[in-house]
Image: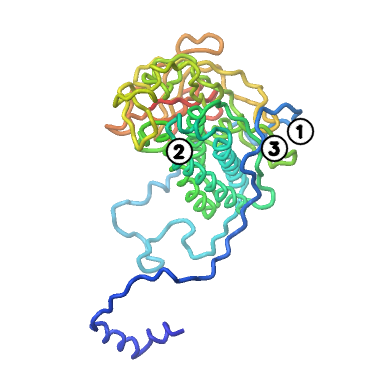
């Protein structure tokens, strides 16, 4: 009340007239206290759940579904009105308020409502919640599974381990946020199974898991009907982007070797995530998304090596093609090298003398047949509607580039890493990208990658840089 009186009538003038007085120098106080604000309760969670493959009987089989209206979404021409705006730097409609241009979504003053308003919203947000739950568990699990000595052998200090713990705590907030948006039937924490046996494999798996988690949200974020929920999810996924970069730094990789981060469809993210979920409660909310067969990269680049491109069958298996250190000899291990350009100890950044991959590299592939039981309680079945594979699609940054498959024999083939740039000076194939086998060269852009889904034969991750 005092503030209001000071800023009314003559008092305001009086206040202004005193502004030329000699200023009093004072020191900041550290004794100010206030009543803490009330924050929403955290969702129930366990730091580390049970782990291992699921061995029971599926309680149900297949993705969530209802009446299906068509086998796929038909491609349509662009909406003509989107070409109408002149985009000449001038204003073309009255301002709704001062300093406010006409247009925008959710800008008319209505009270925001943070909840799903369509099946698309709910299923997308539920997928994001499954991702937050596994990250919460994975980060805690690594700290519990591996000793201090194990982490220090990988070059990770007590401060690094605290950062990992803090990232796990961030996931509690993310899971709470999405649970509050979804309501009572939101998916809960499950149990998990990770394809790692030491810290370096663990860090590589974390780096890849956060990659497809981040990209999975980018893929649907701007398609949400609930713009309000999308805003909150954006502020969550921006944190995960930082986590992914940190895991690259923990792994001794260049932290951000791209100009743009790629987005992927929900079914790709679910395909990559589901195999690492062992079991969920029998009444767990299920998902609609497709589970696609796995693409195995037989000469997947190995960041644990000095020459990470000179490899054969050095992964722990599965969709992420996580690195294996089992066959890396001490004199071939980049962690043991003191040579600049070879050493890969955790750092803010490293440049490699021997790149993990390069344009023209021959990449050998094999892929699984559909019909395999995966995911929580082995209750989802891998499926594809595509014909035999003909192309490899390299999905990175803003690009999808197709290269032909060669020497196709059964479920194996090879292709060549393409040489293309997003813009001049930005090689498009870099970082951790998505490699997809297709039966056609489907023309797509970042906003409509889901048009590829009916043509996907198998899906995996490629460690290009």
Q: Secondary structure at mark 2?
A: helix
Give the percent coordinates (x, y) of residue 24: 28, 79
Give the percent coordinates (x, y) of residue 51: 65, 32
For label 3, the crowd category at 10 Å Cα-Cα, with few meaning under 14, some 14 to 19 and many 20 or more, is some
How many numbered discs, if any? 3
Q: Secondary structure at mark 3?
A: loop
- Give the residue displayed 52% in from the left and 27% down from the top: 198
Horizontally, residue 338 falls left or right of residue 318, namely left
Which of disc 3 and disc 2 is earlier in sequence?
2
Label 1 sits on residue: 59
Pick the front one: 293 or 101: 293
Image marks 1 and 2: residues in contact by CB distance under 8 Å: no
Label 3 sits on residue: 280
The quadrant the C terminus occupies is top left
Pick the front one: 278 or 146: 146
Q: Disc number at residue 244?
A: 2
Q: Secondary structure at mark 1?
A: loop
Which of disc 2 and disc 1 is earlier in sequence?
1
For label 2, the crowd category at 10 Å Cα-Cα, with few meaning under 14, some 14 to 19 and many 20 or more, is many
Separation of residues labelled 2 and 3 (CA atoms): 26 Å
């Amino acid at each position: 009340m005092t503030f209001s009186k000071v800023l009314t009538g003559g008092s305001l003038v009086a206040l202004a007239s005193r502004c030329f007085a000699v200023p009093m120098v004072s020191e900041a106080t550290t004794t100010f206290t206030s009543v803490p604000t009330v924050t929403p309760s955290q969702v129930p969670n366990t730091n580390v759940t049970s782990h291992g493959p699921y061995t029971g009987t599926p309680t149900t089989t297949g993705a969530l579904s209802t009446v299906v209206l068509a086998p796929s979404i038909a491609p349509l021409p662009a909406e003509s009105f989107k070409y109408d705006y002149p985009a000449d730097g001038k204003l073309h409609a009255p301002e709704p308020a001062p300093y406010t241009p006409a247009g925008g979504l959710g800008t008319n003053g209505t009270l925001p409502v943070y909840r799903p308003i369509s099946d698309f919203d709910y299923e997308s947000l539920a997928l994001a919640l499954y991702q937050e739950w596994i990250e919460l568990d994975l980060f805690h699990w690594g700290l519990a599974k591996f000793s201090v000595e194990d982490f220090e052998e990988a070059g990770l200090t007590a401060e690094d381990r605290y950062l990992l713990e803090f990232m796990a705590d961030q996931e509690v907030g993310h899971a709470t946020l999405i649970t509050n948006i979804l309501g009572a039937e939101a998916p809960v924490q499950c149990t998990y199974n990770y394809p790692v046996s030491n810290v370096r494999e663990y860090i590589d798996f974390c780096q890849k898991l956060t990659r497809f988690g981040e990209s999975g949200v980018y893929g649907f974020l701007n398609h949400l009907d609930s713009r309000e929920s999308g805003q909150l999810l954006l502020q969550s996924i921006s944190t995960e982007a930082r986590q992914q970069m940190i895991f690259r730094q923990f792994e001794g990789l260049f932290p951000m070797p791209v100009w743009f981060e790629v987005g992927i469809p929900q079914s790709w993210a679910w395909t990559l995530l589901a195999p690492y979920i062992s079991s969920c409660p029998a009444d767990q909310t299920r998902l609609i998304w497709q589970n696609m067969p796995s693409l195995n990269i037989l000469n997947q680049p190995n960041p644990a090596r000095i020459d990470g491109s000179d490899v054969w069958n050095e992964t722990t298996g599965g969709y992420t093609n996580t690195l294996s250190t089992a066959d890396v000899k001490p004199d071939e291990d980049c962690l043991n090298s003191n040579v600049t350009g070879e050493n890969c100890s955790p750092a803010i950044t490293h440049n490699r003398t021997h790149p993990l991959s390069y344009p023209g590299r021959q990449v050998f592939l094999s892929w699984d047949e559909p019909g395999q039981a995966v995911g929580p309680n082995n209750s989802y079945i891998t499926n594809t509607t595509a014909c035999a594979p003909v192309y490899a699609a390299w999905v990175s940054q803003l690009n999808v580039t197709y290269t032909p498959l060669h020497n196709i024999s059964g479920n194996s083939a090879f292709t060549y890493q393409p040489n293309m740039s997003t813009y001049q000076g930005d090689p498009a194939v870099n970082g951790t990208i998505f490699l997809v086998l297709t039966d056609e060269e489907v023309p797509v852009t970042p906003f409509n990658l889901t048009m590829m889904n009916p043509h996907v034969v198998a899906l995996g991750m490629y460690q290009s840089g």
